[in-house]
Amino acid sequence: MSPFRTVLIWPALLALAALVACDDDAAGTGGNNPGDALPTQDMRPGEDLDRGPRLDNGPVDMAPDAAQFGEYGDPCERGSDCRSGYCIPGPDGARVCSALCRDDEDCGEGFECSPVINTAPDTVFICIAQRNTQCQPCDHDGDCGAGIDRCIAIGAANYCARSCATAECPEGNACEEREIDGQTVPLCVPEGGSCRPCMDNDGDGYGQGEECLGIDCDDSDPEIFEGAAERCDGRDNDCDSETDEGELVAPDEVLCLAQGVCAGVVPACQAGGWTCPYPDTYEAGAETRCDGLDNDCDGAADDDIDFQGDARNCGACGTVCAYENAMGVCAEAVCALGACARGWYDVDQDPANGCEYPCVPTADPAEICDGRDNDCNGAVDEGFDLNADPSHCGQCNRVCQIDRATPACDGGQCVIEACEAGWWNNDRDPANGCEYNCLVTFDGEERCDTLDNDCDGR
């Protein structure tokens, strides 16, 4: 059944009784006259709550022609269209006739019983569409529905405050009396004092809501909010969509070296952290460059360079110990020839030309007679006398071998040193060895006996 049909008949009778009780003095005074009971600013005819026929000249007789008035819930354009005298917005926004009521049960589903503004002391209650206007933004009372809800200042702006004269306040609100136009009105006010409280998870006073001090772009960090001091951390601390901008001040513990090539360097914020932008000539730790500069910024130039033993800076910066085919060394600030490169030898012992002698030693570096420098000392076949060695006579491995004789080498030629017993070299030709076989007789004294007593071949 429609809620409009469940309204009790007594409200209509009550309305008639109230109208009869009015006199001409009440007209325009804001008493029980349904016409004058409406708010002068917010409930003008044609707005949310339209009034019925004026009663300045006495009560209106509705009975003779009841068909001319709309019943509760009937469509209407103005209050004069309705038996109750009130034309209100329905739940769907379309205007319908209201009815007098005692409580919400009289109005049915979707409606509630609410007093009409300025009908005291005999306050008139009518059925209006249920509303949920609490804390909705408003400009005047009419923005808050057809009842006695008011548009008041709550926090930094105006919001609707529901009347708590006949109903409890929504959760999170408390009933407070407010002075409005000289009247004390009970209204629901947010317990926190704001309809748009600050949603602030990190407790810094910044977040979402009109009561916040400002925006908070990271509500989990109490040091990040609109207007906060920007820090060097790669984050937007002041919520301006930029990171590490502006002139940031480095903390006291961030100190840069101030001597040598580091002079004038100040801390800088880079990649979300503090750093000292030293020049390329700076060297952390010990200096390796010998350039007359204090590269490690310890107050002394080139103090880590070993001028006594550094072959690149021997005795002074830039003095390089360099030799051909050899390593240069620095000893007591003086350059010297070091080890030769593989395959090179310093034969002449002259450091000026480095290791000047190319040579590949044999597997056994002991010198042998083979026409090579086996030990790479610059000499070939040293230790071998090709003029007198019968094993290498005149050349390596030329062995003197003479028949029936002991060979010898003289001036690089094989010669007979001695013949075997009974053999003589009478032709003086070593090629045929000791070719003459003979035995000495009579102690080599020649006699006439047909013998070669002295073995001289004659």
Image (cartoon, rainbow, N blue to C red):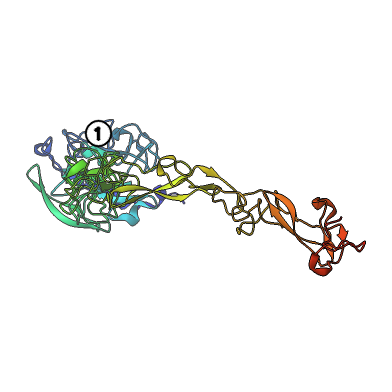
In this rendered view, identify the residue nearer to me: 51 or 8.
Answer: 51
Q: Residue at x 82, y 60 (%)?
A: 424
Image location of residue 137, percent across then percent down: 25, 41
Q: How many marks?
A: 1
**Residue 105 versus residue 232: which sits nearer the camera?**
232
For this orientation, the residue located farthest to the front is: 448
Residue at the disc numbered 1 = 53
Quadrant the C terminus occupies: bottom right
Examine the image and state in which quarter residue 270 appears.
top left
> Could you say whether the residue bearing mark 1 is in a helix, strand or loop?
loop
| The residue positioned farthest toward the left in the image shown | 182
Residue closest to the far bottom: 442
Q: Nearer the viewer, residue 407 or 71?
A: 407
Residue drawn at point x = 17 percent, y = 37 percent: 36
Residue 390: quadrant of the picture: bottom right
Q: Position of residue 377 (x, y in %)?
A: 54, 51
Residue 28, quarter of picture = top left
* Residue ID at (25%, 51%): 304
| Residue type (three-letter) at the residue carrying disc 1 | Pro
Residue 357 shown left or right of residue 416 in the figure: left
Decide: is 24 above or below 433.
above
Instruction: Locate residue 329, reporting x and y percent.
Output: 37, 50
Residue 419 image offset from top left, x and y in percent? 79, 62
